[in-house]
């Protein structure tokens, strides 16, 4: 927990760095514009489609046909669930934009200032980052679709969204944070070793998506937090292994 709080604190400090602020904002605004446009265009179609799908359920359809109050209640729940569903979709779109475009740019600026002692072994690549983000996004959307029936239960949909978004954060940002500094072996091993705290960090970032105004910078801020968490973990791990990080090539202490 201490390492996670430290990562959040360092991410806050990084917000004031030159060239960082713009990358905090544009992914969220781009994602917001995209999904708000789609919501306006397809809102009625989506509501009617979901309502028709629910009415097709054998036991529910009969009850809705016999109860106007029940039908009205379900319609309200559908609209609320649909509105809430757009929040994680906006977040995941912004997160993928951050992972592929914004985070690599921020990573270089942050690393020069805070992790200049950490050797860059370039185990990852921009292509690997893009592929990792696409896979994470597809799996996230599959999870969202599978969880849709539970969104009609108050609170369950929100919990599902937070869990899925937390998983997305650790999957997408974990790779990007390490791709310049870790070698291939470290890039594969560290995320496995740190899976539990990464999920906790990702879940904490996911909650930020539901705080007004803060959610505009939540995806990029989460990326920054993962940069600090993963690079500090990499630095500590190399020191434990007896590798000096100041030299161009690793040296074993005697």
Image: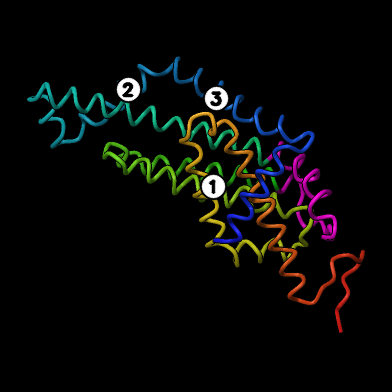
- Left or right, 134 with respect to 126, comes to left
Between 22 and 159, the one lying in front of the other is: 22
Q: Is residue 108 above or below residue 37?
A: below
Label 3 vs label 2, nearer the camera:
3
At label 3, counting other C-alpha atoms closer than 10 Å, the crowd grade (few under 14, some 14-19, many 20 or more) is many
At label 1, counting other C-alpha atoms closer than 10 Å, the crowd grade (few under 14, some 14-19, many 20 or more) is many
Between 194 and 137, the one lying in front of the other is: 194
User: For the residues marked 1 and 2, what is the alpha-carbon distance in whole angstroms?
Assistant: 27 Å
Residue picked out by circle 3: 32
Q: Which residues are magenta?
A: 100-128
Q: Quadrant of residue 234?
A: bottom right
The mark found on residue 159 in the picture is none
Q: Residue at x 45, y 43 (%)?
A: 142
Disc 3 or 2, which lies upstream in sequence? 3
- Left or right, 240 with respect to 59, comes to right
Q: Position of residue 111 (x, y in %)?
A: 79, 50
Q: Secondary structure at mark 1?
A: helix
Q: Residue at x 12, y 23 (%)?
A: 69
User: For the residues marked 1 and 3, what is the alpha-carbon distance in whole angstroms?
Assistant: 18 Å
Q: Quadrant of the N terminus?
A: bottom right
Q: How is the image coloured?
A: rainbow
Q: Position of residue 203 (x, y in %)?
A: 49, 50
The mark found on residue 47 in the picture is 2
Residue picked out by circle 1: 168
């Amino acid at each position: 927990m201490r390492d996670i709080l430290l990562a959040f604190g360092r991410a806050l400090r990084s917000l004031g760095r030159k060239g960082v602020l713009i990358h905090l904002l544009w992914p969220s605004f781009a994602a917001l514009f995209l999904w708000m446009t789609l919501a306006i265009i397809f809102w009625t179609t989506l509501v009617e489609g979901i309502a028709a799908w629910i009415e097709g359920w054998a036991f529910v359809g009969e009850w809705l046909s016999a109860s106007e109050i029940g039908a009205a209640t379900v319609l309200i729940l559908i609209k609320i669930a649909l509105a809430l569903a757009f929040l994680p979709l906006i977040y995941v779109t912004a997160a993928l934009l951050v992972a592929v475009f914004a985070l690599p740019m921020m990573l270089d600026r942050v690393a020069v200032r805070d992790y200049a002692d950490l050797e860059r072994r370039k185990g990852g690549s921009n292509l690997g980052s893009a592929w990792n983000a696409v896979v994470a996004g597809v799996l996230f959307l599959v999870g969202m679709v599978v969880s849709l029936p539970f969104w009609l239960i108050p609170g369950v949909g929100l919990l599902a969204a937070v869990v899925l978004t937390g998983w997305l954060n650790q999957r997408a940002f974990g790779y990007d944070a390490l791709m310049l500094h870790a070698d291939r072996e470290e890039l594969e091993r560290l995320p496995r070793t740190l899976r539990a705290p990464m999920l906790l960090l990702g879940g904490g970032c996911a909650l930020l998506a539901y705080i007004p105004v803060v959610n505009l910078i939540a995806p990029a801020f989460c990326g920054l937090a993962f940069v600090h968490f993963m690079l500090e973990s990499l630095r500590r791990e190399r020191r434990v292994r007896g590798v000096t990080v100041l030299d161009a090539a690793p040296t074993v202490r005697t």
